[in-house]
Image (tube, helix red, strand yellow):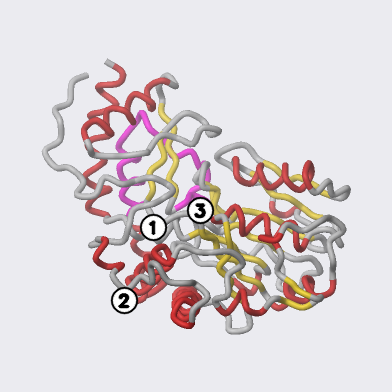
Amino acid sequence: MTIAKPAVRPAIPHFSSGPCAKIPGWSPKLLDRALTGRSHRSAEGKARLKRAIQLTREVLEVPPDYRIGIVPASDTGAVEMALWSLLGPRGVDLLAWESFGEGWVGDVVKQLKLKDARSLTAPYGELPDLSQVDFTRDVVFAWNGTTSGVRVADAAWIPAARDGLTICDATSAAFAQRLDFAKLDVVTFSWQKVLGGEGAHGVIILSPRAVTRLETYTPPWPMPKIFRLTSGGKLSAGIFEGETINTPSMLCVEDYIVALEWARGIGGPKALRSRADANAAAIEAWLARTPWAQNLAKVPATRSNTSVCLTLTADASVPKKMAKLLEAEGVAFDIGAYRDAPPGLRIWCGATVETADIEALLPWLDWAYAQAIS
């Protein structure tokens, strides 16, 4: 099979699932206000960090009684902070349907060594049986499985009245999928995902119920400094006002603020979700006319609109060949499936990606497939 090279190339060929594409029109000049060379503890530094928190609340529509903090070590650090600080007084149900969820299971079982930890798992492409989740226990889950492209469709499966806490890794869902904060006690994400921020910083959002747990429960294990959310039995309120635990990059802080201002300027969460939905819909339309590619997520309602994962009717070497060909042509970078996932492709469709670039990419997938199997 021979297919000519397409005439149109994506203007921005960045389809990595993290770090993700920068906002449209981004350039380093947008960061001229960054407080480089200044202390994050200065009045100006705290003000910029507090501004990032305020904009996060506005753009994500976080309830006013929820706390938002900027924490170390990306989403991984934020999730670990929640696990180490909050788990222990109740049994815990751990949901996993891809590699990051499996990682949290491993940490709770092997590192924290909780005795009453139950794993509810599903293979790549599927969700666990959510009806089996016991909300008298704490529950840990990823809203969107970044490496499988499978998400929960909504929060209807979570009761409003529950005894345990819900701890949600939302790093590839925030700003592109509607998070029902009334059903979530802890929400974590990193700047490098949906808004294309620079890496190494995480965000943790706590409900009043989570704050109560922190102030009434002391874990039996030693707590590393970067995980400590309390002092003297009370919440360390400064963390949620711009006083970070360790030194953040003020350049990265400014980059996040710029992205949040862009998000607010285009219409906020509704507009962000619409952009991601349009990108994912373009791929779905292409899949409908492409016999050799399928969405890894089996159920349409649980298909991600950010980390769209594809499997191919071909040898496992084909998607790897395709990714190399596309990178060599400069039309798509970093779209190979995650190392633990089934062989295939993963195309980031979050709100910072232009639909025109997705549409320009698709004929190149046809071309690369023909080259890879020839």
Q: Is residue 293 left or right of residue 188?
A: left
Residue 265's label in the rendered image is 2
Which label's residue is closer to the chain start, 3 or 1?
1
Q: Amino acid at mark 2?
A: Gly
Q: Is residue 291 magenta?
A: yes
Which residue, given by chain and number where applicable, does mark 1 sit on? 196
At a point 50% along the width and 64% down the height, the residue shown is: 248
Q: Is residue 101 magenta?
A: no
Which label's residue is closer to the chain start, 2 or 1?
1
Which residue, given by chain and number where applicable, does mark 3 sit on? 301
- Between the residue at mark 2 and the residue at mark 1, the CA separation in whole angstroms equals 16 Å
Span colored in magenta:
279-304
Vertical comparison of 234 with 200: above or below = below
Q: Amino acid at mark 3?
A: Ala
At a point 43% along the width and 52% down the height, the residue shown is: 306
Residue 261's label in the rendered image is none
For label 2, count other residues whose C-alpha is less than 10 Å away and answer few (under 14), some (14-19) or many (20+): few
Asked whether 124 or 14 is in front, the reply is 14
Which label's residue is closer to the chain start, 2 or 3?
2
For label 3, count other residues whose C-alpha is less than 10 Å away and answer few (under 14), some (14-19) or many (20+): few
Q: Nearer the viewer, mark 2 or mark 1?
A: 1
Asked whether 44 or 7 is in front, the reply is 44
- Badge 3 marks a residue whose secondary structure is helix
- Between the residue at mark 3 and the residue at mark 1, the CA separation in whole angstroms equals 25 Å
Q: Nearer the viewer, mark 2 or mark 3?
A: 2
For label 1, count other residues whose C-alpha is less than 10 Å away and answer few (under 14), some (14-19) or many (20+): many
- Badge 1 marks a residue whose secondary structure is loop
Give coordinates of residue 71: x percent, y percent.
58, 64
For the C terminus, which image quadrant? top left
Give coordinates of residue 39: x percent, y percent.
47, 72
- Badge 2 marks a residue whose secondary structure is helix
